[in-house]
Structures are given as structure tokens and as C-alpha cells.
Amino acid sequence: MAGGAQLAQQNKRDLTTGSIPKKLIRLALPIMGGMFLQTIFNIVDTFFVSQLGHNAIAAVSMNMPILFILIAMGNAVAVGTSSYIARSIGAGEDEKARKTASQAITLAVILGIVATIIGVSFAPYIISFMGAEGELYSLAVEYTSIIFWGNLIFFLFLALDGVLRGEGDMKTSMMKQVVGVGFNILLDPIFIFGLGPVPAMGVAGAALAIVLSRFLGLLFLVWHFSTGRSTIKFNMTKFVFESEIIKQIMAVGLPTSASQAMMSLTLFVYNRLASGFGDEAVAALGLGFRIDSLAILPGIAIGISMVTMVGQNYGAGELERVRRSYWTAQAMAAGFMASVGVFLFAFPEFFIGIFSQEQDVMSHGVSYLRILPIFYPFLGSGLISAHSFQGLGKAIPALIISLIRVGLVGIPLALFLTSQTGLGASGIWLALGLSDFTFFGVGMLWFKSTFKRMTRFVHS
């Protein structure tokens, strides 16, 4: 670690020494805590919305692939920023880390404005493409349009979070989640059902609560950075466009964004296929994704930790530590997710029943939880490989793995199983699971091959 990474040392976030499992757990726990809170809100939100009927659940469910696309766009900046800041800190290039933060804010503003204009303009066409009609169409357009109006807030929120994760400050990242989710849970029932002078707004109220709570979370982040509490201190009044830094951010960010957007577009297809089996199947798909989002938290948290862990060690030239971190993370993610999968597989009626007692929704939802949890360990492994590539600054392999996952396996299998077999909506669930298995196999083989080439190059 030539010259030492001063930023990391000052804040006791140097990941190039010490116990790998302990470092990963310290990074992952705050991430998991923040994401757990967000997922709890998603479940609470789904519960409140479910009181409005299955059309309301389906309307909010239809926004999920749109939300994933927005997250993908925001992560073009956030993940690229996180990776480059981590590598810069590992290499001892502290000034470069500071400059990267200011470039990220500027990119987030530009992306946020563009996404708002496009999203608000095309919301009705997007919802129509997904197969919504009648009341479902009206509710989905209303909900989605409000979410689009909050894009600028959301992208700034993600960019500043990327700076925190790059420097290894996962605790503050979790605290911003506590602020946002706390207000969201408070505002959700008020805006949905009304209270005092606040009128009942239904699904529109749920969307408005999300946008407002994100704004409050953003204010917390602005306060954190502007009061000198962060490791990385930057001044936007002295901003100078740095094309090389922008290039480095986008080198990781764009392939990552494309990979996530591709998964979101796949969800459009799955929603469309599910709509062929009734609005109840669409609602069950949405409920399944909400439950998944909680169940796979260990894999996601450890994966996100690997961007910083791998980034710092790769920047410091500690390749052997990169290798050991990868296999430690693989074992941790697979073990945690297998445990959660067994629990969901054993009690599917209970978890679906929390949100809906409608017979058809229950039937589709139970079949979902009898299939997807079997593949959780493989999904966890794939997430570790993808995030490790991001930490290395090599996001193209993760993009190609996703292409194989959805383009060669997920979508073709879903189309085949729903049209050529008697599986019905369960064919979609099975296609999702088999695509996760592909994610595992291709991801692990590719990372091993890449690491061998890197090691050979260094030794030569």
C-alpha cells in the first residue's frame, strides 16, 4: 500500500489488513440493516396498499421494474463512484477520491433532470405496454408519474450514498436509510388513507410518501457532508469538470447500469406474461419480489461490501487478499441465503397470507415460494461475482453474465414454459430460478479465469 491510504487509516476503514470475515461483516451489517429497514417499509407499504384491493397491489407491483430501471440509472453514477473512490483510497490517491465525489454529484443532477422529463412524458405508454387496462391502468399511471417526478432527489440520494460506500462508511449509509424509511412508514398510512386535513389519496399517496421521505433522507446526507463529518470533503463551488474521472466512473457505472436495467426490462416481460394468467398472478409476482427483496438481503449486503473490499485491496496491489475475500464472501452469502430459503420454502402460506387472503393470489404466491427459494444460494454466489468485478473496475463481465442470464436463459425459458407446458404462471417462477443458477455458474467460472490472468500478469 504505497504511501498508505490516509483517508482509510484516519477513519479506521483500512480493508487491506486484518481478518477478512470480520471486515466483511463490519461492512455488510450496516448495509443489511439499512436495506432491511427499506424492505420492511416495502412490506408495510404493500400491506397498506393491499387494503385497497388486488388492483392497487398490481398497480404498485407494475412499478417495480420501473423502479429497478431508475435504480440502474442512478447506480451508473453510484456504483462507479463507489468503486473508483475505493480504488483511489487503496492506492493512497486521496485527492482523486475527493474530486470523484464532486463529479458524481454533477452527473447525478444531469441524469435526474433527463430521467424526470422522459419518465413523466412516457409513463402512460410504459404502463400500457405492460398490459394494464381499465382501473389497473389508471392506478398504475397515477402512481408511476409521481415516482418519476422525484427522480432528481432519488439520483442525488444514490450518488451521495455511493461516496459513503466508496470510503467504507456503511454506518452513515445505514443512518440515511433510517431517516428515509422512518418518515416513509410514518407518512404512508396518512397519505394513503388520510388523516385530519390530509385527504385520502390511495396509491397516489403511497407514491407521494416515498418521494417526500427520499427528500428528507437527502437532506440528512447534505447535512452530513456539509458539516465535515465525512472522510471525503469536497466543495462544489470549486467544481471543475474532470473528464478522466468521469470516464473512470462510467467505465464501471454504465455496464453496471445496463446490467441492472436489463434485469428490469426482463421484469417487464415477466409482468406481461403474468398478466396472461390474470391480475392475481401479477399481484402474486409483486408479492414474491417483495418477499425476495428481504430474503436475499445477506447476499446483496455482502456483495455491495465486496465493491469496497476488492476495490481497496486491488488498488493497494493485494491480489492474494482479493482472492481470499472472494471465496470468504462466497461461503458467507451462500450459507446465509440457503438458511433463509429453507424457512420460506417451509411456510409459504404464512408469508403470502400476510398480504393477501384472496384464493388465486394465495395459490400463485405459494407456488412462487415453493420454487424460487431453492435457488437462493446460487443467486447469492452470482451477486458476489458481479460485485467483485465492479470492485476490480471491470464491469463488462458482469454485464455479459447478465445478458446470458436473462437473454439466453430467463426470457426464452419463461416464454417456453408458459406457452408449451401446463405450468401456467409457475413456468415464470421456474425460469427465474434457472436464470439464477446460470448467474452462479457463469459468474464463478469467469471470475476464477479473470483472477488467474491477473495473477499471471503480475508474476510475469
Image (cartoon, grey):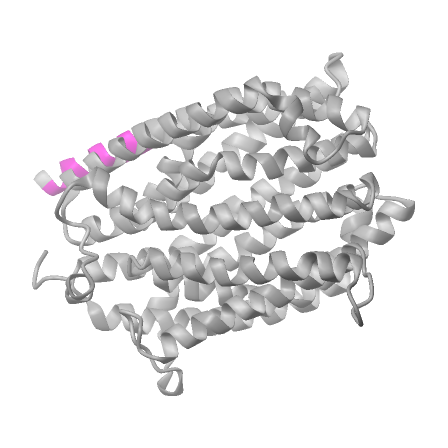
**Where, by quadrant of the figure, is residue 275 drawn?**
top right
The residue lying furthest to the front in this view is: 196
Regarding residue 145, the answer to whether it shows in the image is no
Please give the name of the residue rendered at 62% of the width and 43% of the height, measured from the top-left corner.
43
Task: Pick whichever, 447 or 148, lies toward us.
Answer: 148
Please give the name of the residue rendered at 29% of the width and 51% of the height, measured from the top-left corner.
308
The residue lying furthest to the top in this view is: 422
Q: Position of residue 123 (x, y in %)?
A: 76, 57
**Where, by quadrant of the figure, is residue 224 drawn?**
bottom left
**Where, by quadrant of the figure, is residue 88 drawn?**
bottom left
The answer to whether 273 appears left or right of 5 in the picture is right
Residue 213 against residue 445 in the figure, above or below: below
**Magenta region, residue range:** 447-458
By secondary structure, the bulk of the magenta-drawn segment is best described as helix
**Count of all numbered marks drawn on residues in the image:** 0
Task: Pick whichever, 321 or 441, lies toward us.
Answer: 321
Q: Position of residue 108 (x, y in %)?
A: 50, 68
Task: Pick whichever, 147 or 56, lies toward us.
Answer: 56
Placement of the C terminus among the 4 image quadrants = top left
Please give the name of the residue rendered at 50% of the width and 65% of the height, measured from the top-left corner.
157
